[in-house]
Image (spheres, helix red, strand yellow):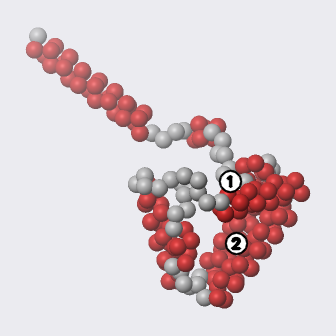
Amino acid sequence: MKLKTLSLIAGAIALSLTTTSFAVVAQTASPSPLLLAQTPQKPKGPWAELGLTDTQKSQIQAIRRDSRTKFEAVLTPEQKAKLEAAKQARQAERQAGQRQPGQHRGGRKNFADLNLTEAQKTQMRQIRESEKQQIQAVLTPEQQQKLEQFHQNFKQRRQQPNSQ
């Protein structure tokens, strides 16, 4: 009789341990790649409203990657280290919940902390202008007009005092 009871208890413990581990895995597992693929990522800012084709998106991404590489080539190793440290601090803030993605508090300050020379500033302006022209060449006239309208509206909003 005792053997039967012990067998039942051991079976119940084994069953509960097995189901508990399945429940933990179900709660902590990340969404399957299939579910992630079905969830469309929405572009942010003006790009969401331009109706870019896949070809345009890939061309713009390539232009931006190229510009980023050129920007990094302008910086000294010390400036790169400062920029990387600021990036990691922003990521840590975001992970700690102190800051939402897309908030740019202090972004200009971090860039100003790099102490860029006038030559570096000039090079970066040229890279940015080249990037802008390349992206404009990828867009249709209608998309260019929408983008310009977005920039105009953005400038107006920045110039208005906060109404709070």
In the picture as drawn, the residue positioned furthest to the left comes out as 2
Residue type at mark 2? Ser
Crowd band around label 1 with a 10 angstrom C-alpha radius: few (<14), some (14–19), many (20+): few
Element assignment for label 2 = helix
Residue at which label 1 appears: 45
Residue 138: % across, % down: 84, 61
Q: Nearer the viewer, residue 3 or 94?
A: 94
Report how far apart the C-alphas of labels 1 and 2 lie in the structure: 19 Å
Q: Which residue is mark 2?
A: 67
**Rendering quarter of residue 19:** top left
Rendering coords of residue 11 (x, y %)? 24, 21
Up-down: is 135 above or below 39?
below
Q: Examine the rendered structure and indicate whether residue 63 appears above or below residue 50.
A: below
Rendered residue at 46%/72% (across/down) = 85
What amino acid is at disc 1? Gly
One can see residue 80 in this view: no
Mark 1 or mark 2: which comes first in sequence?
1
- Residue 130 shows in this picture: yes
